[in-house]
Every structure is written in structure tokens, then in C-alpha cells.
Image (spheres, rainbow, N blue to C red):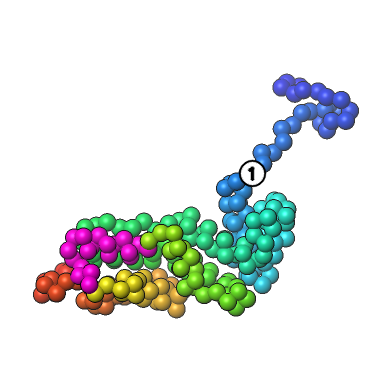
């Protein structure tokens, strides 16, 4: 037999001959952690929070419970980390179209395309998680924004630099308004937000609050 190294009787045998095999490559660091969090997310979607266990996650990830416990000491910690992992592995790109209106619309449309499935999973699987841990979806939003500006903050900052927005009237709540209204619609229906509603959020509610007074006699053109 070609390309085989024969060994003694203590080695594993194949057809009466011992054959040397290479051990499977061990996952480490980010690769291992990603595999564990992917397994936790898959288990959460299939079983729900109540039936999910570190044992089932470890089995699905082809590892052991101690490997999980060293990173996440409880089921709640693991699920929280899996949530952040799933969201952060598919980040939303911040549009830069050159105008405030088009940036905000492009942002909301992008979220519409890429976050509907996640919103449905959050509603379907995480009610028990939120009850057990006392967390809310707003806590999730705050955790995601802890180390970076939100997309709306970046969009609004550029609009201020272009002179589209009067910064004197800005507050954190106003800056978050398009995202908050959009998120409310998405979570209440578990369906993509109709484009007409996206345009209403931007044109009827948000822009009149933030655009400079001297531009209000020259509204943004209506979309085709």
C-alpha cells in the first residue's frame, strides 16, 4: 500500500496493517469561540431558551462542557454572547450618499433586508430569556452601542458638517428616532417594514425635527 507507514501491533490497524493517521486539528481562540456561539444560536432557534443547555451546545459544537464554562459560566451569559455574535458578524454598513435624507432611507432599507429574520427569532425565542434575566431589547441595543457610535450618530454628524442640520436642537433621543420607530414597527409585526412607512418615518417625522429653518421652504423632493 502506497504512502502508508506501518507500525506495531499497538497501532490502529487497517486490513491487517497498521496505518498512521493525523490527529484532527484543534480549534482555538476566535475560531473555537465562533463555533461555540454558532452552536448556541442554532440550539436557541431549535429548542428555545428554556430547553437550551450547555450540554446540548457542547455536543453540537463537538466539544465539552468545561470548554463552555470557562468562557460563559451560565446559560444566560452564553445566550447573551451568542446574540451579540450573530449581530456583529453581519454588521450594517453606514450609507454615505451625500444627503441626510438619502442616508437615513438607505440605512433603514438595509436593516429591512438584513434584520427581519433576526427580529423574528428575538421575539419567538427570547421571551423566556428576557423574563429569566430581566433584560430588554433596549439592553441589547445599548450593549451593541457601548464601544462604537450608532449608524445614526455617524449619519447625523456628517449632516451637521454639511450644514443640513441645526445641531442646537439635537438630542440623543432625536438622533435615535428613525431607528427607534423602525425597530418598533419591525418587532411589532415580525415582518419587513413597508417602504411607504420608511419614507414616512424619514420625511414626515424625522426631517422636520432636525433640518435647518432656512431649508424648510425647500423640502427634499418626493421619491419617484
The x, y position of residue 63, in whole percent, is: 70, 51
Q: In which quarter of the image is residue 36?
A: bottom right
Q: Quadrant of the N terminus?
A: top right
What type of secondary structure mainly makes up the magenta span?
helix
In front here: 71 or 116? Answer: 71
Left or right: residue 24 versus residue 116 is: right
Which residue is pictured at 64% across the width and 60% down the height?
A: 72
Left or right: residue 216 versus residue 183 is: left
> Label 1 belongs to which residue?
27
Dot 1 surroundings within 10 Å: few (below 14), some, or many (20 or more)?
A: few
Q: Does the magenta stretch include residue 43?
A: no
Start-end of magenta stretch: 150-168
The x, y position of residue 94, in whole percent, is: 33, 58
Which residue is pictured at 47% across the width and 57% down the height?
A: 88
Which residue is pictured at 57% across the width and 61% down the height?
A: 81
The x, y position of residue 51, in whole percent, is: 68, 70
Q: Quadrant of residue 27?
A: top right
Q: In which quarter of the image is the C terminus?
A: bottom left
Left or right: residue 161 versus residue 24 is: left
The x, y position of residue 55, in whole percent, is: 72, 60
Amino acid at each position: 500500500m502506497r504512502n502508508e507507514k506501518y507500525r506495531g501491533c499497538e497501532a490502529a490497524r487497517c486490513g491487517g496493517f497498521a496505518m498512521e493517521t493525523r490527529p484532527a486539528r484543534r480549534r482555538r481562540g476566535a475560531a473555537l469561540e465562533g463555533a461555540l456561539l454558532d452552536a448556541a444560536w442554532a440550539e436557541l432557534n431549535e429548542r428555545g431558551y428554556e430547553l437550551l443547555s450547555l450540554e446540548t451546545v457542547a455536543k453540537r459544537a463537538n466539544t465539552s462542557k468545561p470548554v463552555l464554562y470557562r468562557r460563559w459560566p451560565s446559560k444566560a451569559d452564553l445566550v447573551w454572547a451568542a446574540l451579540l455574535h450573530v449581530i456583529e458578524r453581519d454588521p450594517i454598513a453606514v450609507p454615505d450618499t451625500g444627503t441626510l435624507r438619502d442616508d437615513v432611507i438607505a440605512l433603514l432599507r438595509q436593516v429591512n433586508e438584513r434584520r427581519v429574520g433576526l427580529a423574528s427569532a428575538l421575539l419567538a425565542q427570547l421571551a423566556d430569556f428576557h423574563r429569566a434575566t430581566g433584560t430588554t431589547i433596549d439592553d441589547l441595543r445599548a450593549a451593541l452601542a457601548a464601544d462604537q457610535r450608532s449608524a445614526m450618530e455617524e449619519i447625523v454628524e456628517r449632516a451637521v458638517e454639511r450644514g443640513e442640520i441645526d445641531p442646537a436642537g439635537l438630542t440623543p433621543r432625536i438622533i435615535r428616532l428613525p431607528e427607534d420607530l423602525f425597530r418598533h414597527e419591525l418587532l411589532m409585526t415580525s415582518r419587513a417594514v413597508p417602504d411607504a412607512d420608511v419614507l414616512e418615518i424619514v420625511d414626515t417625522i424625522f426631517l422636520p425635527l432636525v433640518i435647518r429653518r432656512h431649508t424648510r421652504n425647500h423640502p427634499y423632493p418626493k421619491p419617484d
